[in-house]
Image (cartoon, rainbow, N blue to C red):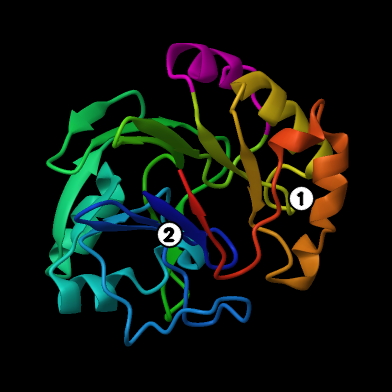
């Protein structure tokens, strides 16, 4: 399969037959190379309800008739908007036609902030384990460091992990390096940095902090790797 990175926490996975998008924050994302009005996806997987992760889900899903997989409250909310959704919750797994999705905990928050200054709670924030074509990908979402990352990695050997390093709202480079150690992922890629002034980071610092820097990779926006 092909895995590509598109700025902030946007990840695209292209399997033999399907295109899967994680957290498609495109409009308003100055770092991305994608165009919301052109993007197509068979499946959209969301980690939580913040605008810089839900992003352009509604427009893409309506145009593509995407299946949107999300934490349950967020799935219900998007279902009210006419999207085809599948709600899940932390600890739960489901075998879809394209692969297996398991939601893990994440220590963060999750809400939609409306134009009239209302905050709508969207359930617990999450990370995601996606197992497809014999590989397991861990998208940690927005999270702080937590010790059960070790248990996640032991129970679900991880081929590729996307870990936030931006600090301020999530882990910073030091904690993310510890997260890489705990998960035991074969390859770790930093995400959620440099999109806004408050999350400016040098990703090379994260790589240098890893126990084995050869297990880390900085993906350029639009770059694709084979997994």
Q: Which residue is painted at 47% across and 82% down in the image?
A: 27
Where in the figure is residue 83, as x and y percent of width and height?
A: 15, 65
Viewer-closest of 71 and 191: 191
Q: Is residue 172 left or right of residue 205?
A: left
Q: Residues within 10 Å of mark 2 (few under 14, many from 20)?
A: many
Q: Residue at x 59, y 27 (%)?
A: 185
Seen at 53% across and 79% down, the residue is 33
First to last magenta residue range: 145-157
Can you tell which quarter of the image residue 36 is in? bottom left
Q: CA distance from mark 1 to mark 2?
A: 18 Å
> Where is residue 122 shown, x and y percent of the image?
37, 51
Q: Position of residue 155 (x, y in %)?
A: 44, 12
Q: Magenta segment: does it hold 152?
A: yes
Q: Which residue is mark 1?
A: 167
Q: Is residue 156 magenta?
A: yes
Q: Which residue is label 2 attached to?
A: 23
In screen coordinates, is 28 left or right of 192? left
Q: Secondary structure at mark 2?
A: loop
């Amino acid at each position: 399969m092909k895995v590509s990175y598109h700025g902030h926490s946007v990840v695209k996975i292209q399997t033999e037959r399907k295109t899967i998008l994680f957290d498609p924050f495109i409009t308003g994302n100055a770092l991305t190379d994608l165009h919301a009005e052109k993007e197509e996806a068979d499946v959209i997987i969301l980690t939580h309800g913040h605008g810089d992760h839900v992003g352009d889900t509604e427009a893409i899903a309506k145009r593509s008739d995407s299946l949107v997989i999300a934490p349950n409250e967020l799935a219900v909310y998007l279902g009210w908007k006419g999207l085809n959704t599948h709600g899940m919750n932390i600890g739960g797994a489901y075998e879809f036609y394209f692969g297996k999705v398991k939601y893990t905990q994440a220590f963060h928050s999750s809400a939609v902030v409306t134009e009239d200054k209302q905050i709508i709670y969207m359930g617990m924030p999450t990370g995601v384990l996606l197992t497809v074509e014999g590989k397991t990908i861990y998208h940690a979402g927005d999270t702080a460091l937590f010790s059960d990352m070790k248990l996640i990695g032991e129970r679900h050997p991880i081929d590729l992990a996307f870990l936030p390093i931006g600090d301020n709202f999530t882990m910073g480079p030091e904690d993310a390096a510890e997260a890489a150690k705990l998960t035991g992922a074969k390859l770790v890629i930093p995400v959620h940095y440099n999109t806004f002034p408050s999350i400016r980071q040098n990703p090379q610092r994260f790589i240098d902090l890893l126990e084995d820097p050869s297990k880390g990779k900085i993906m350029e926006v639009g770059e694709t790797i084979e997994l």
